[in-house]
Amino acid sequence: MTAAFTMTHTDNAARTGLLRTAHGTIPTPVFMPVGTAGSVKAIAPDDLLKIGAPIILGNAYHLYLRPGDELIARRGGLHAFASWGGALLTDSGGYQVFSLSGLRKITEEGVVFRSHLDGSCHLFTPENTVAIQRNLNADIMMVLDECVPYGADYDYTERSTALTTRWARRARAACPAGGNLLFGIVHGGFFTDLRSRSAEEICAQDFDGFAIGGLSVGESKAEMHSMLCHTAPLLPQEKPRYLMGVGTPLDIARGIGAGIDMFDCVLPTRNARNGTLYTSLGKINIKRKEFAEDDSPLDPACDCYTCRTFSRAYLRHLYRSRELSAFRLNSLHNLTYFLQLTRDAQKAIQEKRFAAYQAHIESLYPEESAL
RNA sequence: GGAGGGGUUCCCGAGUGGCCAAAGGGAACAGACUGUAAAUCUGUCGUCGUACGACUUCGGAGGUUCAAAUCCUCCCCCCUCCA
């Protein structure tokens, strides 16, 4: 069986590669738009194709609750149900352990959630989250983990990370190898020795790729960066590396510099819906008065439909008027920007000039770049 | 002509003696958002001042009172009903 991942170029720690899935081969580094409920909010699959998204995310927790993973399975899986021909990665619900912390209880067996939709109780285990993700037919599945909250003390983090490791073994055991890819997740909070131990224990298992979890949970840029730089080199070279939930363009550029291959984040789509847009000139808030009569394109360097067609003044008007097209046009642009960012990074790595490229991105986000 | 109701800070609107620079909503102006409980949330929103504070404001003019958006008098304007 051919390996799922092939590294193609390197430039110091940064690398490019090809990730083979049942729904296409993905050039890395890659940014994966988030489509929690089986839809990248405000964006249809044909738009995703046009902007060159090879893979998107779904979420096991949300899709299990509604409409139900078995209902989706009866329709041929999430690709068929959502008419998405590209690759799919699903999160196990581990992030919801963190984000819905008021609605769940963690035990050795798994996590009991009270549904945020109707309050009903549901048990998520390493085994059934794999089963749910297989019902969805995700090309890449994630093991159930606990995303440790920022500020957790050493003792809590050590116990949580050990539990995530035991869960990872159970998930691997519950999932036949050779089908859908399964990724393990390294935790350890903000303690380097726990990150090292987690990496050792997770990477000793036969996963198809390895993720770094528990970053971008409220810590400073400096803390995140130092934890990333500690952890990324501990992951196997020959497997894909995925930095979960990250991040800003700057975070992504730094992640690539640290040897990460895959990223996902709600930022481009959520911020698009909240009026913050990423451009080749930096971040702008389209709501601002200064754009009221600005007839220039949103981003003169971008060739997305939004930038080719509309002025900043019009986009501001759409946003302020609560026109639904604002969500689509803004999301289309932001996703284009994030996807282009990783494509540009691929090119820079191939041409051995990634350091300069990263420096360029740093210069666009000066207020974030201090370390 | 008669009877009644009403004019509040950009808009709507609460407030009927002091706790009122005046609820609440909207608009406006900023900011946040990182494996999505998010078309969400936060701040500012009379003037000056970093702030304590000072000053001006509740249709207009006068008055009562230690104190008035609130009570009294007159005036201006708006709405409803009856003739």
Image (tube, coloured by chain):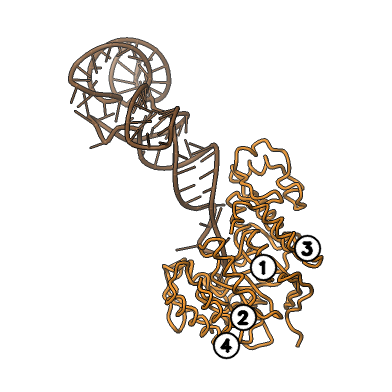
Chain colours: A orange, B brown
**Which residue is at a point 46% across and 77% down the rendered structure image?**
A111
Mark 3 and 2 residues: CB-CB less than 8 Å, in contact?
Answer: no
Q: CA distance from mark 3 to mark 2?
A: 40 Å
Picture disc at residue A56? 1
SS type, badge 2: helix
Q: Amino acid at mark 2?
A: Arg
Q: CA distance from mark 2 to mark 1?
A: 16 Å
The chain identifier of the residue carrying mark 4 reads A
Q: CA distance from mark 1 to mark 3?
A: 28 Å
Mark 4 and 1 residues: CB-CB less than 8 Å, in contact?
Answer: no
Picture disc at residue A134? 2
Q: Amino acid at mark 3?
A: Arg
- Residue A150 is situated, as x and y percent measured from the top left of the image, at 48, 67
Q: CA distance from mark 3 to mark 4?
A: 43 Å
Pointer 1: residues within 10 angstroms few (<14), some, or many (20+)? many
Mark 4 and 2 residues: CB-CB less than 8 Å, in contact?
Answer: no
Q: Amino acid at mark 4?
A: Ala
The quarter holding residue A6 reads: bottom right
Picture disc at residue A353? 3
Q: Which residue is mark 4?
A: A174
Q: Which numbered disc flags the more N-terminal residue, 2 or 1?
A: 1
State which quarter of the image contains the N terminus of chain A: bottom right
Q: CA distance from mark 4 to mark 2?
A: 11 Å
SS type, badge 3: loop
Discs 1/3, front: 3
The chain identifier of the residue carrying mark 3 reads A
Q: Which numbered disc flags the more N-terminal residue, 4 or 1?
A: 1
The chain identifier of the residue carrying mark 2 reads A
